[in-house]
Image: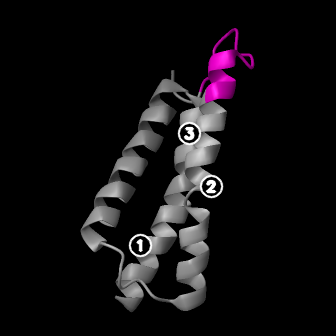
Amino acid sequence: MLLGMGKDWAMTFETVLGLLAGSLTTIAFLPQVIRTWRTRSTADISLGMFLVLCTGIALWFVYGLMMGDWPVIIANGLTFILAATILFFKLRHG
């Protein structure tokens, strides 16, 4: 169900677990984003890896939308923004 919360949506253990996992994997990108933003240096970052990573994150986001899975939608939406920021700096500053 597209963007639906379902008829019995509640904060189940599975939902809390998904939100926690998504939060941790999203937060993991913050130090690299901050460092890249400050230094404008992306020499040690693989362009190919970040292109594939951003594509995968975008696909997980679309999957979350299609399934109406809010932890997947939120985590991958935010993670995509952070990863895309690094990718932007990589493309801009090499």
Q: Main secondary structure of the magenta part?
A: loop
How far apart, in angstroms, are the residues tagged by discs 1 and 3? 20 Å
Mark closer to the chain start, 1 or 3:
3
Dot 1 corresponds to which residue?
A: 87
Q: Residues within 10 Å of mark 3 (few under 14, many from 20)?
A: many
Looking at the image, which residue is at 54% across and 54% down?
A: 79
Location of residue 86 in the rendering, given as x and y in whole percent from the top left corner:
47, 73
Dot 3 corresponds to which residue?
A: 73
Question: Is 40 drawn above or below residue 21 in the view shown?
Answer: below
Q: Secondary structure at mark 3?
A: helix
Q: Is residue 16 visible?
A: yes
Looking at the image, which residue is at 62% across and 55% down?
A: 27
Residue range of the region highlighted in magenta in the rendering: 4-17
In the image, residue 6 lies in the stretch drawn in magenta: yes
Q: Amino acid at mark 1?
A: Leu
Mark closer to the chain start, 1 or 2:
2
Looking at the image, which residue is at 63% across and 15% down?
A: 6
Q: Is residue 5 visible?
A: no
Q: Amino acid at mark 2?
A: Ile
Q: Amino acid at mark 3?
A: Ile
How far apart, in angstroms, are the residues tagged by discs 1 and 2? 17 Å
Q: Which mark is residue 27?
A: 2
Q: Residues within 10 Å of mark 2 (few under 14, many from 20)?
A: some
Q: Residues within 10 Å of mark 1 (few under 14, many from 20)?
A: many
Question: Is 94 drawn above or below residue 30 in the view shown?
Answer: below
- Residue that protrudes farthest toward the right in the picture: 11
Q: Nearer the viewer, residue 30 or 68?
A: 30
Q: Nearer the viewer, mark 3 or mark 2?
A: 2
In the image, residue 27 lies in the stretch drawn in magenta: no
- Quarter residue 34 falls in: bottom right
Q: Secondary structure at mark 1?
A: helix
Mark closer to the chain start, 3 or 2:
2
